[in-house]
Image (spheres, helix red, strand yellow):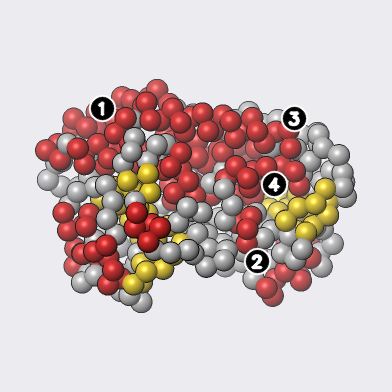
Amino acid sequence: MRRRHHATARVRVTAAGAVIAALALAGCSGPAPAPTPSATDSFPVTAPAPTASAVVTAAPQRVAAIDLASADLVAALGGRLAGAPSPGYAAPWFDAQLNTSGLTPTRYHEVPGISLSTVKALKPDLIVAADTLLDPDLVGPYTDLGAPVVSSPGLATADWRDRTREVARAIGRSGSADPLIENATRELAEQTTVYPSLKGKTFLVLDVTPAAEARIQVHTARSGQVQFLEAVGMTPAPAMAAAGAPEPGSTRSSVPAAAAGTLAADVLIVNFPGGRDQRFLQTDPHLKQLPAVASGKGLLVQTSGPIHQALDAATPDSFRWAIDNALPDVAETAYLVDHPDQVSPSPSPSR
């Protein structure tokens, strides 16, 4: 599963920050209204599964979600969500969706792993793990629970719109998918007007850890973070394609840390575990060669918290929440690429 926390550490400026904040007020968004819970499709339907395909014979009445993205999609699409993970981090977009829909699913811990007995106790008639790569040794036990299991490497790394449609079809709510997608797509596209500094800026998203086996993880086109940034008008830097294709089921490509100096972009977003001082980027012998670190220009450092999780979840509601909570920092970083004179000498505290 792809799970991390994200609070954003960034350089704060007075003039640029005021402009960004004022523009952001124009685009605040809450969760989309939940559709009515009745199914709209004919059954049976087939859906992606760990082996071949799953056959859903009737409209699901008790859906168990194995990851937060799946739970978010089922709830937003008007499905009957019986169980959802309760991860060790805040997920305001999902909490808002539950409040809007009135759903009260049983919650279970996601880390280190969801107990099969907990899921079995729900007596689900459908299990959705759209954002999860089930370990081979778990495929059989989940299937043995007697409910179709919707999960596959292709689904976990799919375009967010395609994954939304697949989950909608599995729960009999195909008609609810396109309105959700269209609303989110429209709001994302509007951000090029709200934040003109984003248009055409190149970007890279990296996962790094101090002394992490001399490897850097480069987010590829399959990554939720990359899909989000492209949707608001930014352009992947050539170094993303140069990093090569990811392994099946992954959204990251691994490159040697010694190649850090080649990872150039107008805006470089670096994700690293919370609780670390970001100054290690300046002291690590490889990471300090990252062009944005070396120049001090176009660097946005994100530590673990809801922002990273929302972008990785890549659902209509998580992206709409990220517009208000993640995008202002990205837009400010892009703005400062063209207006470096407005940078204050010291970073603000992480939020």
- Mark 2, residues whose alpha carbon is within 10 Å: few (<14), some, or many (≥20)? some
- Asked whether 46 or 299 is in front, the reply is 46
* Residue receiving disc 1: 19
At 50% from the left and 40% from the top, the residue drawn is: 319
Which is in the foreground here, disc 1 or disc 4? 4
Is 7 rendered above or below residue 201? below
At 53% from the left and 63% from the top, the residue drawn is: 250
Q: Which mark is residue 166?
A: 4
Alpha carbons under labels 3 and 1: distance apart? 40 Å
Residue 285 appears left or right of 197: left
- Label 2 with label 1: CB-CB less than 8 Å: no
Provide residue 282's location: percent of width, then percent of height.
19, 63
* Residue receiving disc 3: 36
Q: Which mark is residue 296?
A: none
Which is in the foreground here, disc 4 or disc 3? 4
Q: Amino acid at mark 4?
A: Glu
* Residue receiving disc 2: 134
**Quarter of the image that includes the N terminus:** bottom right
Q: Secondary structure at mark 3?
A: loop
Provide residue 98's location: percent of width, then percent of height.
63, 38
At 33% from the left and 25% from the top, the residue drawn is: 23
- Mark 4, residues whose alpha carbon is within 10 Å: few (<14), some, or many (≥20)? many
Q: Amino acid at mark 1?
A: Val
Which is in the foreground here, disc 4 or disc 2? 4
At 37% from the left and 26% from the top, the residue drawn is: 193
Alpha carbons under labels 2 and 3: distance apart? 31 Å
- Mark 3, residues whose alpha carbon is within 10 Å: few (<14), some, or many (≥20)? few
Mark 3 or mark 1: name the one nearer the start of the chain.
1
Mark 4 or mark 2: name the one nearer the start of the chain.
2
